[in-house]
Image (cartoon, rainbow, N blue to C red):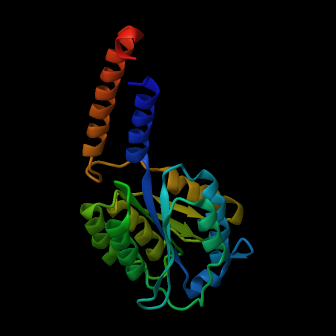
Amino acid sequence: MNARILLVLILFAGAAFAANSYVIAVDASGSMAYKVDGVRKFITVRDALVCMLGSMKPGDEIAIFLFEDIDRVTLVQNFTTDKGVLEFAISRMTSRYGSSDLPSGINVSSTFALANARNQNKFVIVISDGGTATAALFETAAHFRRAGIAKIQVVGIGVDTTVRPGMALEGIADNGGGSFYTTNYYPTTCATLKAAYEDTTVRGGGIDWWPLGILVLLTLALTYVAWRYLARPRTEWE
């Protein structure tokens, strides 16, 4: 047996278990038409998402939703690992700037992740200025964490963290096992989204760890087989 084949199998197994699935839910309500740092919040998010793709890791898949108006949640892009496809979808995102329906945004995007993600680790990133954020969503976030979402990350755009909507966004992230990020400036929004994307460390109880055990056992088994073959003279096994 060729040692190179064994190495490829080990690397393939590692990639399969290391990759993550992300659903990004973007607020497209009327308040996202307001300007922060001279640029509309919605445009700021759109540009920052394209920038964020520069940090996208091989094997990761991303899906994108827009939520606006009551029960109007639109799938902008289904799960894909193709950065070009994602960039094209993001560049075409538009909004009617209607009312905000954050509850539907969280419910639809999280349910979609659970039903359609191909990777074991599932993350939801909610981007909003907090228009309809309330403490009533804390249990919603906790429910989806228990159901299998590793983290619900929340990114606030132009959010006052000292008032109720801002504090509610932070509470949603906390109950969803994630972290709350906020930015008030166009140039820093990309870095903020990258931080939410790259923070895949899971706090206690939010994720199933059995795939890691399988990966370790598989790696040990393949390493043992490789050692056995490599330890024998080539004339015995060629």
Q: Nearer the viewer, residue 145 or 62?
A: 62
The correct choice, above or below, for 222 with respect to 194 in the image is above
Rendered residue at 27%/71% (across/down): 139
Residue pushed farthest right?
38
Instruction: Judge left or right: residue 191 versus residue 21.
Output: right
Q: Quadrant of the N terminus?
A: top left
Residue 108 coordinates in the image, percent (x, y): 38, 77
Residue 56 coordinates in the image, percent (x, y): 57, 53
Instruction: Judge left or right: residue 126 versus residue 193.
Output: left
Rendered residue at 31%/22% (across/down): 225
Q: Is residue 172 shown to the viewer in this render?
A: yes
Q: Nearer the viewer, residue 91 or 237?
A: 237
The correct choice, above or below, for 209 with respect to 111 in the image is above
Q: Nearer the viewer, residue 122 or 3?
A: 3
Residue 94 coordinates in the image, percent (x, y): 62, 83
The correct choice, above or below, for 2 with respect to 57 in the image is above
Instruction: Judge left or right: residue 52 versus residue 74.
Output: right
Q: Is residue 171 shown to the viewer in this render?
A: no
Rendered residue at 42%/25% (across/down): 2
